[in-house]
Amino acid sequence: MPSTEGQVSTDSVTAEASGERPTVSQDPSAPVTEGGGDYAFGTERDEMATAIEAAFAARNATARWDGDVLVPSLDGDADEDMAAFSECRVLTQLLNEDDGAMVEFPNGKVDCADALAED
């Protein structure tokens, strides 16, 4: 079977089984919505929380929705100068514009709007 590593296709399993090489047929700059969800990569809200948990698994992350605010809880220190900055950058790229994000540490919470605010 030919290798399809690194290829993107919704039919990759079928293509591998038939020996065809899958191709990308859409504009690479277009948003991916093949999953049918409203979030990045066509995911649903709950799938986004699960993906965030997996992405930050090394920091013992859990994630939950509190209304329209995604709240990942993870190891770290809310009192650090750059607390939650990197995490919030990731979250704001993955969430919808009308969603909020807040990172919860063992010693406090950091609202992403505050962490990313320019002084």
Image (cartoon, grey):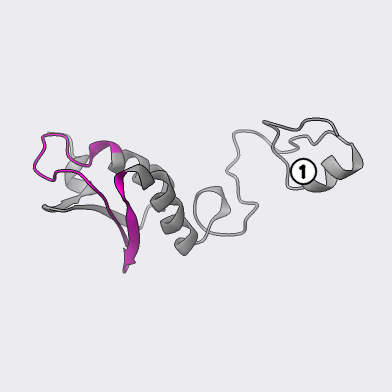
Q: How many marks do you count on the picture? A: 1
Q: Position of residue 70 (x, y in %)?
A: 32, 58
Q: Judge from the rendering whether residue 89 lies leftward or rightward of residue 75; answer left or right.
A: right
Quadrant hosting residue 2: top right
The extreme right residue here reads: 18
Q: Residue at x 87, y 44 (%)?
A: 17
Q: Judge from the rendering whether residue 47 lies leftward or rightward of residue 75; answer left or right.
A: right
Q: Judge from the rendering whether residue 2 lies leftward or rightward of residue 32; answer left or right.
A: right
What residue is disc 1 on?
12
Q: Amino acid at mark 1?
A: Ser
Q: Position of residue 25 (x, y in %)?
A: 76, 37
Is 116 colored magenta in this rendering? no
Q: Which residues are magenta?
A: 59-86
Quadrant hosting residue 15: top right
The extreme left residue here reads: 79
Q: Can residue 102 be seen in this snapshot?
A: yes
Is 79 colored magenta in this rendering? yes
Q: Residue at x 8, y 42 (%)?
A: 79
Number of other residues with Cα within 10 Å of mark 1, as a class: few under 14, some 14 to 19, many 20 or more: some
Q: Nearer the viewer, residue 98 or 116?
A: 116
Quadrant (top left/top right/bottom left/bottom right) for the C terminus: top left
Q: Secondary structure at mark 1?
A: helix
Q: Can residue 95 be seen in this snapshot?
A: no
The extreme bottom residue here reads: 67
Q: Position of residue 106 (x, y in %)?
A: 16, 53
Position of 62 relative to 117 (above/below): below
